Amino acid sequence: MNKISRNKIFRSRYILLFLAIFLLTGLLLSFFILENPLKIPISSNRQSTSKIAFTSYRDGDGELFLIDINSLNQTQLTFNEVDDINPSWSPDATQIAFTRSFNGTHDIFLANADGSNITQLTNGSTNDLYPSWHPDGSKIAFIRYEDKIANIFVINSDKSDLRQLTSNDQKVVDKLDWSPDRKKIAFVSNRDGDYEILIMNSDGTNEIKLTDNSEDDGKPAWSPNGDKIAFASMRDGDWEIFVMNVDGSNQTQLTFNNVYDTYPSWSPDGTKITFYSGLDGDAEIFMMNAEDGSDLNQLTLNKALDTHPDWH
Ligand SMILES: [Ca+2]
Ligand SMILES: [Ca+2]
Ligand SMILES: [Ca+2]
Ligand SMILES: [Ca+2]
């Protein structure tokens, strides 16, 4: 065999080997993509860092706690003799805004997600409750009760630029929530004699009433993709969790019992809703499927009140 034919055989072996590696890589890649379309690291990371902040009175007064949704382990964040309630995650999950009640008034405070570095955001003789973080993290809306008047205020998270967003007497009460696209706020008003869920533009204009019945509706929570609002309603005689479209259509009841079920908050992927319920005699944190209320899971178990879940 001459040198040229040896080289030819050598070259064709290389080509065959290259083709085989190429085909095998292609096969492995397509197998991975076809068999594992959803097993991407992002979703497992997201789930493993997902936490529910809530209030518990298990040490005698209100403290902030976390539930790690992966392990279901609970962590206590505050330790004091005042009431820490209404936790609300910052969009980047590094901070929690909450209401602290002491000396007869309620004010908005901030803490790091591990409970450290607690700072006071609002002060004075008013009662400031239900903080809700703007989706860009720059500011926090809350309800300010002054005498018998309740209005929505906004303050920057660096304590600057306190502004009043609404101005009518008795216009708003209860928890509020920014839409994920930052354009609207869902809130609660009793101007028609009982409480209803409304939405307005984030500058306070263009109010639209979403519920219209003679019983109380409250605690609106926007779904992560912005197309639904979960809320609580008394329309069957006690508080139940409902979900509706953002135009108020398709109001769907998810809980059915004769105790209170309230304060819904969506999982980051929008498939679950956490809330608190009196199902076992005192308040506990639960979660269920957002679609139909199935797969009900109890996340706390004790004799004290466990309330105000906020899921991130
Ligand atoms: Ca406390
Ligand atoms: Ca109503
Ligand atoms: Ca109920
Ligand atoms: Ca409890």
Image (cartoon, grey):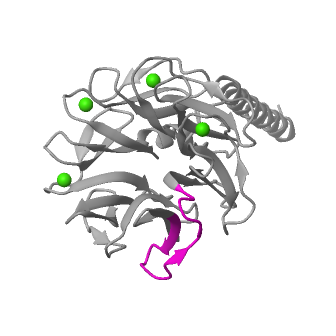
- Residue 225 sits above or below residue 141 on the image: above
Q: Is 27 left, or right, of 66 in this rendering?
A: right
Q: Where does residue 139 sit, x and y in percent of width and height?
A: 51, 70
135 vs 217: above or below: below
x, y percent for residue 117: 26, 68
Q: Nearer the viewer, residue 233 or 82?
A: 233
Mark count: 0
- Dominant SS of magenta comes to loop
Q: Residue furthest bottom?
A: 160
User: Which residue is pictured at 29% across the width and 71% down the height?
Assistant: 119
- Residue 41 colored in magenta in the image: no
Q: Is residue 162 visible?
A: yes
What residue is at 40 percent from the left and 22 percent from the top? 297
Q: Quadrant of residue 135?
A: bottom right
102 sits left or right of 270 in the view: left
**Region in magenta:** 151-172
Q: Residue at x 56, y 23 (%)?
A: 254
Q: Is residue 94 among what the camera can see? A: no
Q: Examine the image and state in which quarter residue 224 appears.
A: top right
x then y, percent, for residue 71:
33, 32
Q: The N terminus lies in which quarter of the figure?
A: top right
Instruction: Judge whether 276 appears above or below 105 on screen.
Output: above
Left or right of residue 32, residue 3 in this image:
right
Of 91 and 24, nearer the camera is 91
- Report x, y in % for residue 15: 80, 36
Using the image, determine if residue 183 lies above or below residue 270.
Answer: below
- Is residue 154 located in the magenta-colored stretch of the structure? yes
> In the figure, residue 172 lies in which quadrant?
bottom right
Residue at 27%, 35% (x, y): give it.
73
Image check: 290 left or right of 301? right
